[in-house]
Image (cartoon, rainbow, N blue to C red):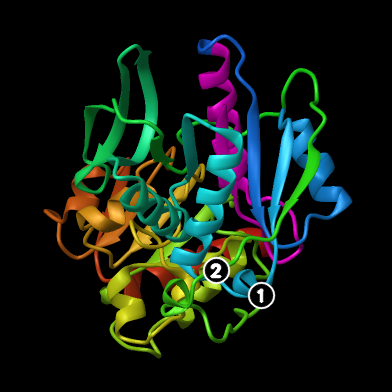
Amino acid sequence: MILVLVEKDLAGDAVEVSLETLTFARSLSDAGGGVPVDAVVVGDVSPALQSQLAAYGVRDVHALGGPGFAAFAGAAWASGLETVLAATRSVVVMAAGTPRGGEVLAHLAARSGVAMAANVVAFDGLAPFVVRRQVVGGQAVEEMQLSSRPTVFTVAGHAVEAAPAVAPAAATLVEHAPEVAEADLVARVVSTEEPAPDLSGSLKSARVVVGAGRGAGSEGGFDDLLELADLLGAPLGVSRVVTSLGWRPHHEQVGQTGSRISPDLYIPCGISGAIQHWAGCSSAKAILAINTDPDAPMVTKATHAVIGDLHEVVPAINAEIRRRRAG
């Protein structure tokens, strides 16, 4: 049996990367002769979520409830997942390669005494079980053999396209309320703050994304970039240094520790293109880089590039867009 940890969004639906992971799990199931795919969800499972998981071929939905699961705690989630693993005798456990997915499965692997593969993009065989995974911030792909049981790994975002099953499954709800040790709650979320509404659409699903890096210069240097994003109906994505300096909120970050995007067009402005950032934007179909450094990694990897100061280039682009629309 294959277990998939499914994460929910604020509306209670499965997040896109979890649906991608379920799609990956079905391909693994098909290769293994049709073994069942079950989902593990922390918290309430609404009828809408149950139907959504059924459409993706989930046989049983294991809901983890109780005081220990009221807020996110990686070790507590892993202990709950361990309970379901023992009850179902699953041989494979996977999750999306999100910060939470990676943390929970790392705890589970440590508890089980097995290796964990992170950011898997494909599997090459079942006996032995060999996976391919992204390493060095997505700059390289390595093969890794996973011979231990259970087999534990995370699936890289956008490794596959989310697709419903040909025929829906039952998605029968199975509730669990395991005890959680106090030691598993030492590191936990104690408060949350919702980001400001993103009027331009989600970074992960946007067809156009405007990027901003250290070249913005200061916290007040984003006006022209925000105008460009507004003119294009695009969200703003930023590099890690921008969030580290406190210039923009973390939910806008693109990169290895932020969002992984795959737009039709990415316009990185003043972003050098460090490996960690490239890991989050390398799936873009086209990249138009704006940078003063012609040798910057982002410029050399871009489909097109404009060499110049973003504070001169971007206002000119904005003016031209307004002129053409006015005409």
User: Left of 183 or right of it: where is 203?
Assistant: right
132 drawn magenta = no
> Residue placed at 31% from the left, 30% from the top?
148
> Residue placed at 52% from the left, 61% from the top?
77
- Vertically, is 94 above or below 244? above
- From which residue to which does the magenta span run? 1-30
* Residue at mark 2: 180
- Vertically, is 176 above or below 263? below
**Residue 39, quarter of picture:** top right
Along the line of sight, which residue is nearer the eye, 87 or 8?
Answer: 87
The three-letter amino acid code for the residue at tag 1 is Pro
In this orientation, does residue 199 appear? yes
The three-letter amino acid code for the residue at tag 2 is Val
**Residue 164, quarter of picture:** top right
> CB under 8 Å between callouts 2 and 1?
yes
- Vertically, is 210 above or below 33? below
* Residue at mark 1: 67
Q: Position of residue 83 (x, y in %)?
A: 56, 50
Q: Position of residue 295 (x, y in %)?
A: 11, 53
Q: Position of residue 208 (x, y in %)?
A: 54, 52
In this orientation, does residue 319 appear? no
Q: Position of residue 4 (x, y in %)?
A: 57, 40
User: Cα distance, mark 2 to mark 1?
Assistant: 8 Å
